[in-house]
C-alpha cells in the first residue's frame, strides 16, 4: 500500500491496519510455540512408548523367571529323577494342575523322546528337531521357543525348556507349554490407557499375546511392512494397527529381551496429542479474541496502548525460541484481551514446565520403585527357595514343614524390622530381639543380650536374623533352653577396621544338658556356613561340654550413629 493511499485512510483505518500488522508477530509466536510444543510432545510420547515397552519386558521377564523356577523345581524332584515312570507321570499331573501358566509338562531324554507326560499316555514322538530343545541342550540354559502346535497335546503353545544338569552332564530336559490365554491375562491385568496396546510375538512375527482385542490377533503374523521391527534394535515407530488406530509404538525385538520374544507397547496418537491439540485450539481462540479486543482498543485509545504489550509478547516469544522458557509476559495488571492473551501464554508455559517437572519426578520415582521392588522380590524368592531346599532336602514330613514355617516367620520378622527403617539399615540389638522374640516371650529371663550399637546395612540383616533363629531353635531342641536351668548369652563387640567395623558376635550357652559334637553335618551347620559366606564373614562352632559356643565374625561398613553409649545389657 502506497503512502498516498495511507494518507487518504481515516484515522480509524490506520489504527486498525496498525493493529493488524502488530498482531502478526503474536500469531507467529503462537504458531512457533504450538509447533515446538507438538514436537516436544512427540519426542516425549516416543520416549514414553519405549519406556513402557521396556517395562513390559521387565514384567514378562519376571513371569518367565517364575516359570524357569518351576521347571527347575520339577527337574530336581525325586519323582522325576527316579526310574518309576508312573510315579513321574503322577507327579507331573499334580504339579501341572496347580499351575495356570502351563498347559502341560513333559520330561524329554537327550534324544527328544518323552519319558513321562503330565497329560497321560506318553506319545512316541521326538522333539529333537525343535529349536527350543536344541538350544536348551546346547547352551544348558532356559530356552523359549516359537508359537507352534504341540506334537504332544495338539494345543497352540509357546514351548519352554530347561535342562536338568548334573556336573557337566545334561540328564534330561524339562519342557512345558505356556498357556497363551494366561499370558494374555497377565498383560490385561497391567491396565492400559485408552487407545494403548501391548503386543508379544515370537521370532517369526507370530503374535502370542495382544491387548486389547486378543481374539483378532493371537496366532496371526505381522503385516509385511512391519516385519522389520523384528530385526532392528529397540526403538519406536509410528504405525497404523490393523484395528485402524494410529499409534506411536515402542518395541524391543526378540534378540534384546531376556526371554527371546518381541514386545511392543503402543500409545494412541489421539490420546497422546489430544491435550496439545486442545491447547492449540484454545490458544488460537484466545488469539482471535485478543486480536478483536485489540482492534476495539485501537479504535478507542490508539497505538500507545496496543504496540507496547504486543512488542513485549514478541520479545517473550523470541526468548522462548532461543530456549529461555523462564521468560514470561507479566501482563497480570491488565484485564483486557491483550492482557488475557499474555496471561494465557504465561499459564501455558508455566503449566508445561510444571507438568514436565512432575513427569520427570514421577518417572524417576517409578523407575526407582520398579528396580527396588524387582531386586527385593528376587532376593526374597532366592532366600525362600534356599530355605525350602535345605529344609526339605532330607525330610519332607510335618517336622520339616514346621521348621520351614518357623524360618519363614523369622524371615518375615526381619523384613518387618527393615520396613520400619525404610530398608536402609537396622541395629544389631533390634535384629536379635526380633529374631529371638518367639522364645523370649516366655523365656526372656534366660537370655542376656549385650553389646554396643551396631548399624547393619540391609543386605546382612536377614542373614543375621536367620542365624539367630537357627541357633535359638537348636538350643530349644538340644541345648541350654531344652531344660529349666539353662541360659543363653549373646554378646558382641565392635572394633574399627580399615574396611569398616569388625564385629565379633558370640552365642554361648551354659546350664543345659551335656553337649556332644554332632556325628554329621546337619541343616543348621549348612545354614550357618551359607549365611556367613553370604555376609562375607566366618564362624567357629565349639561344642564344649558346658554348652555350645558359636563365634561369628564379619565386617560392616562404618556407621554414622551418634556418640556411642556404653554397652547395654538385659
Image (cartoon, helix red, strand yellow):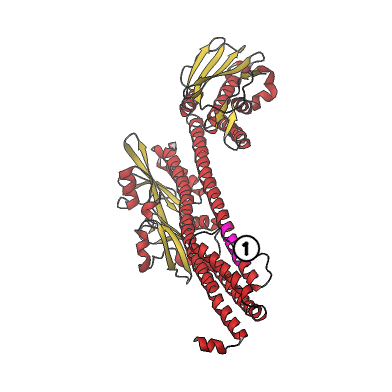
Magenta-colored stretch includes residue 344: yes
Give the SS element for disc 1. loop
The answer to which of 314 and 117 lies nearer the viewer is 314
The answer to which of 224 and 455 lies nearer the viewer is 455
| Horizontal relation, residue 193 to residue 223: left or right | right
Magenta-colored stretch includes residue 432: no
Instruction: Determine the main secondary structure of the stretch shown in magenta.
Output: helix
Q: Is residue 155 visible?
A: no
Provide residue 419's location: percent of width, then percent of height: 61, 37
- Which residue is painted at 64% across and 20% down in the image? 565
Provide residue 270's location: percent of width, then percent of height: 52, 69
Provide residue 457's location: percent of width, then percent of height: 54, 31
In the rendered image, which quarter is residue 79 located in? top left
Q: On the rendered image, what quadrant is the C terminus found in?
A: top right
In the rendered image, which quarter is residue 454 located in? top right
Q: Is residue 462 visible?
A: yes
Q: Is residue 26 above or below residue 41?
A: below
Counting the numbered discs, the total is 1
The answer to which of 370 and 74 lies nearer the viewer is 370
Magenta region, residue range: 343-353
In the rendered image, which quarter is residue 203 located in? bottom left
Which residue is at the far top?
A: 545
Q: Is residue 179 above or below residue 32?
A: above
Provide residue 249's location: percent of width, then percent of height: 45, 62
Q: Which residue is mark 1?
A: 330
- Which residue is painted at 57% across and 79% down in the image? 18
- Which residue is painted at 58% across and 83% down in the image? 14
The answer to which of 534 and 19 lies nearer the viewer is 19
Amino acid at each position: 500500500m502506497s503512502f498516498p493511499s495511507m494518507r487518504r485512510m481515516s484515522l480509524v483505518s490506520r489504527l486498525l491496519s496498525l493493529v493488524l500488522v502488530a498482531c502478526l508477530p503474536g500469531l507467529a509466536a503462537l504458531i512457533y510455540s504450538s509447533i515446538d510444543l507438538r514436537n516436544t510432545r512427540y519426542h516425549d510420547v516416543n520416549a514414553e512408548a519405549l519406556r513402557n515397552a521396556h517395562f513390559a519386558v521387565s514384567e514378562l521377564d519376571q513371569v518367565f523367571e517364575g516359570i524357569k523356577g518351576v521347571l527347575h523345581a520339577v527337574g530336581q524332584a525325586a519323582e522325576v529323577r527316579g526310574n518309576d515312570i508312573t510315579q513321574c507321570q503322577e507327579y507331573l499331573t499334580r504339579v501341572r494342575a496347580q499351575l495356570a501358566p502351563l498347559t502341560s509338562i513333559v520330561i524329554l531324554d537327550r534324544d527328544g523322546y518323552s519319558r513321562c507326560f503330565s497329560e497321560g499316555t506318553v506319545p512316541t514322538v521326538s522333539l529333537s528337531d525343535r529349536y527350543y530343545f536344541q538350544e536348551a541342550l546346547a547352551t544348558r540354559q532356559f530356552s523359549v521357543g516359537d508359537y507352534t502346535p504341540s506334537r504332544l497335546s495338539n494345543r497352540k503353545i509357546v514351548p519352554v525348556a530347561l535342562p536338568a544338569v548334573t556336573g557337566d552332564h545334561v540328564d534330561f530336559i524339562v519342557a512345558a507349554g505356556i498357556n497363551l490365554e494366561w499370558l494374555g491375562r497377565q498383560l490385561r491385568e497391567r491396565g492400559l490407557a485408552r487407545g494403548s496396546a501391548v503386543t508379544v510375538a515370537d521370532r517369526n512375527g507370530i503374535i502370542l499375546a495382544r491387548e486389547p482385542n486378543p481374539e483378532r490377533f493371537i496366532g496371526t503374523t505381522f503385516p509385511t511392512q512391519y516385519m522389520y521391527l523384528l530385526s532392528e534394535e529397540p526403538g519406536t515407530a509410528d504405525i497404523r494397527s490393523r484395528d485402524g488406530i494410529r499409534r506411536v509404538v515402542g518395541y524391543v525385538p526378540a534378540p534384546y529381551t531376556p526371554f527371546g520374544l518381541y514386545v511392543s507397547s503402543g500409545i494412541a496418537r489421539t490420546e497422546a496429542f489430544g491435550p496439545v491439540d486442545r491447547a492449540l485450539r484454545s490458544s488460537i481462540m484466545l488469539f482471535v479474541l485478543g486480536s478483536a479486543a485489540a482492534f476495539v482498543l485501537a479504535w478507542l485509545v490508539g497505538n500507545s496502548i496496543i504496540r507496547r504489550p504486543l512488542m513485549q509478547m514478541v520479545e517473550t516469544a523470541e526468548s522462548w525460541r532461543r530456549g529461555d522458557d523462564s521468560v514470561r509476559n507479566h501482563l497480570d495488571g491488565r484485564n483486557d484481551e491483550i492482557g488475557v492473551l499474555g496471561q494465557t501464554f504465561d499459564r501455558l508455559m508455566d503449566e508445561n514446565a510444571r507438568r514436565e517437572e512432575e513427569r520427570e519426578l514421577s518417572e524417576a520415582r517409578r523407575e526407582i520403585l520398579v528396580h527396588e521392588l524387582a531386586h527385593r522380590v528376587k532376593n526374597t524368592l532366592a532366600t525362600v527357595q534356599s530355605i525350602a531346599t535345605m529344609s526339605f532336602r532330607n525330610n519332607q514330613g510335618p517336622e520339616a514343614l514346621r521348621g520351614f514355617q518357623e524360618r519363614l516367620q523369622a524371615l518375615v520378622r526381619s523384613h518387618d524390622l527393615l520396613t520400619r527403617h525404610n530398608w536402609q539399615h537396622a541395629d544389631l540389638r533390634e535384629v536379635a530381639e526380633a529374631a529371638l522374640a518367639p522364645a523370649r516371650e516366655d523365656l526372656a529371663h534366660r537370655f542376656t543380650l549385650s553389646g554396643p550399637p551396631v548399624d547393619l546395612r540391609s543386605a546382612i540383616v536377614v542373614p543375621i536374623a536367620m542365624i539367630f533363629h537357627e541357633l535359638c531353635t537348636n538350643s530349644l531342641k538340644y541345648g541350654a533352653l531344652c531344660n529349666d536351668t539353662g541360659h543363653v548369652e549373646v554378646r558382641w563387640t565392635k572394633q574399627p577396621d580399615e574396611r569398616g567395623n569388625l564385629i565379633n558376635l558370640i552365642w554361648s550357652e551354659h546350664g543345659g544338658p551335656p553337649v556332644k559334637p554332632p556325628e554329621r553335618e546337619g541343616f543348621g551347620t549348612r545354614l550357618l556356613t551359607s549365611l556367613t559366606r553370604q555376609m562375607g564373614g566366618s564362624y567357629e562352632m565349639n561344642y564344649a561340654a558346658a554348652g555350645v559356643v558359636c563365634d561369628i565374625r564379619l565386617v560392616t561398613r562404618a556407621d554414622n550413629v551418634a556418640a556411642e553409649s556404653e554397652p547395654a545389657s538385659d
